[in-house]
Image (cartoon, rainbow, N blue to C red):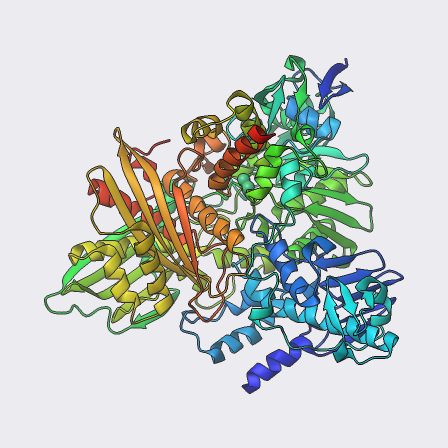
Amino acid sequence: MSTTLKVNGKTHAVDLPDDVPLLWVLRDEIGLTGTKFGCGVASCGACTVHIDGEAVRSCQVPLSDVWGDVTTIEGVGTPDALAAIQQAWIKNQVAQCGYCQSGQIMQAASLLAENPTPTDAEIDDAMQGNLCRCGTYPRIRAAIHDAATLMQEA
Amino acid sequence: MSRVGKIARRSFLIGSAALVGGVAFGAWYVGRPAPNPLKPGQGEAAFNPFVMISKDQITLIAPRAEMGQGVSTTWASLIAEELDVDLDQVTVLHGPAAKAYYNSALMGEVLPDKGYDRSNFQHKLGDVLGHVGKVFDMQLTGGSSSMKDGYTRMREAGASARETLKEAAARQLGVKRNQLKTERAQVIAPNGTKLSYRDLAVAAADIEPIEAALKPRSEWRLLGKDQPRVDMVGKVTGTSEFGIDVRLPGMKFASVRMNPRLGGGMKHLDASDAQSMPGVEKIVDLGDGVAVVANNTWLAVQALDAIEVEWGDAPYPPESVAMFDAIRAAFEAEPNSTLRDDGDADAVPAGATLLEAEYEVPYLSHATMEPMNATALYTGDRLQIWAGNQAPTFFQSKCAEAVGLETEAVEVNVTYLGGGYGRRLEFDYGVIASKVAKAMQGTPVQVTWSREEDMAHGMFRPGAVARFKGAVQDGKAVTLDSRIAAQSVTQSMMMRLIGSPGAGPDKVHVEGAFNQPYAIPNYRTRGYLAQMDLPVGSWRSVGNSFNGFFTESFIDEMAIAAGRDPLEFRLELTEPEWAPAANVLKQVREMSGWTGKTPEGVGRGVAMSYSFGTPVAEVIEVVDEDGSIRIARAWIAADMGLVLDRRNTEAQMFGGMAFGLSAACFGEITFADGMVEQMNFPDYDSVRMHTMPKTEVALLETQEHMGGAGEPGTPPAAAALANAIFDLTGQRPRRLPLMHDFDLLI
Ligand code: FES
Ligand code: FES
């Protein structure tokens, strides 16, 4: 039984049981390893991707329930063609170990899509499900504000 | 220069070794050369184990684990500074596991002195003792030692390679070497002719290495300035390869379950249901655990859930209460160490106010964001392994042992680390992957632990109990007498590494207590080691992680008992002892606008800890928010003598503090029926975006020696917070985590 999935604009036929979470389809089957595994129980945000533009925890979405087009960090921008939000992350030198950052960026991107100029309180609300054990929060906050400015200018 | 100094210097610089297609030289010898780990191909020259130049590219080797501290960037900058190349012209690689990359600074920390009062002579002795690092094959990233270790050696490596390239150019052009200049990977002749390093590499390989004086600080182009991190673009595009991201042709995905009673055996295994589950390829009986190999990690975990195992008993007291009884029982035995005993700590000065307090902190998990994992391919006579690891030479020999191969038959590839914090100094996850790979000969296997497995099978920060006595008189501290009881991290790690606990006083156990730069006339610290068969390990700042909380809480209690402002009280104790410690206190006083008074509903606390050569002071402000306590603001000042990259070091400071605050508020590993009770992040929370304080960092350069950066931000955090909570509530926190006794904002 094969399931069809559209990820970063490309269609994939996947032959895995229905209940395999999207996270593990992306990582182990399709080979998109930018999306990370942290907890598997929706408590860290490392696995955040977009489905039809909405930020979701891919560890919680079974393959059979994927309801729309999936965008992962690889679909946001590449080293040669960085998205504004990634440029803001670089400008602020956000990452430490970097493991949580794909999820942070995907979460922040969906915040900015809904709310182009979030306040600190709105950032607190939107980002508190994304854990960073290295404690990069101050720079994530600064990068979100910078990304907001960059995206306004664009 | 002293004789000892000369020997130390010479042993770092003498000698060269010819290799096929090139030459390796300098910088890593201790009397006798270690084999150069880079085997240059045709047309390449390995200038030493840190620089490799070929026709196509210049590669700098940073044999340190990149776990977020920016070490690869700063390490490369040290070489690039002297080599006269820019970071955009080079590729920076992690080195392979090799003896040439031993860590001399870390072993230097073994000297049982207080650290901050070392004379130059003692520093030299530390360097010489550091050579033991090579004997033990210690290539490791820990002890906040990378920059101390690399600072001189790497610049020398760069300078030597540069001069040798110039000599090659001089011979080619028929001019004198001192007429030549270098810039952006080119040698420039007096007439303006430019020769690229890449074109000179092979000729330079035939020249005896040339020593050169190091550039004065005033001529630095890269060091001391913020460098964009070489790993940043990869980390924001999802293209950096962490251990868990390794993908090899034909690779299978596995997961593992070990006895939840750590170190207990396996009595019975029934995998009949799991065998036929979707995706399952093989069940591997590991003797003390079981692994499932599948075509997907998640399917492997599902199959593990279907396996019935009868586990053996825990080899340690099965309940937390009994464990802490065992820790307290250590106070009844002779101390393992008395590393400081100034004055007479037993005497009671007439008229002094006496204080006593007992503090307790729990076992902790490292909880790296990337769960433990490793990928391995076993082919009968060879084992290749990919993993994020802080000590690849140990990792290599332990994995070799696990599959019955010679160390040389094992190749370790170090990936990025999704957090280390000391957990990836261990090799347990590599050994498991190696065994699973052996059962799957010829097929690469990635073994990923579930978060639950990771949390339950840590190399925990030991739980610890401290008993303090003190005396204050006329507003001053006269006696500080501390006793610290816990399992020994050093002994536990030594047992795992070499099968023997080692002997003598365990300095790590009392660091952060015995060596604080306080002028207190009667100052004694004794360490007591609890014996328990539960693995404990290095957790960001190790002994300092608990001793910082203990000591700085008690100093605060003394200040209050003496009727003094806690910051001024500390300032008076540090000023006569060591100026840099006083300087960081003055700095946070100024930054935070400390007045010693706070309005209703606001509390402030201060703490100062000296660790890994760096004094760090932190002020934390808490506010009462409708009955909950919010950590609102923080100010950090650190003095590491020389700041090589300010922006990156600042991140280490606030990150280190956040790590300490997370543990102080929410962190605990407890045991029931021999098993860890916490399973996943909901039971082991951290500071998050909305609970992280607004933070300012100041980096001073007033001390003479170079201190570490990766860990010193952690030790004062818990105490500064506890002291702030005391200021707010009047209730003195004496145990962690604080969430049990205070209503913290979550
Ligand atoms: S892995 Fe999905 S939220 Fe943690
Ligand atoms: S950067 Fe390491 S967990 Fe966020």
Residue A85 spot, x, y in % from top left = 59, 33
In the rendered image, the vertical position of residue B449 relative to residue B345, given as above or below: above
Image quadrant occupied by the N terminus of chain B: bottom right
At 15% from the left edge and 69% from the top edge, which residue is drawn? B349
Q: Is residue B151 left or right of residue B191?
A: left
In front here: B325 or B153? B153
In front here: B480 or B576? B576
Q: Is residue B722 left or right of residue B105?
A: left
Residue A5 spot, x, y in % from top left = 72, 17
At 19% from the left edge and 54% from the top edge, which residue is drawn? B560
In the rendered image, the vertical position of residue B334 relative to residue B659, given as above or below: below
Image quadrant occupied by the C terminus of chain B: top left
Residue B125 spot, x, y in % from top left = 52, 77
In the rendered image, the vertical position of residue B26 relative to residue B314, given as above or below: below
Q: Is residue B733 visible?
A: no
Q: Within the displayed image, which quadrant is ligand 1 positioned in?
A: top right
In front here: B428 or B570? B570
View extreme (left): residue: B351
In the rendered image, the vertical position of residue B543 relative to residue B375, given as above or below: below
Q: Is residue B739 left or right of residue B243?
A: left
View extreme (right): residue: B42
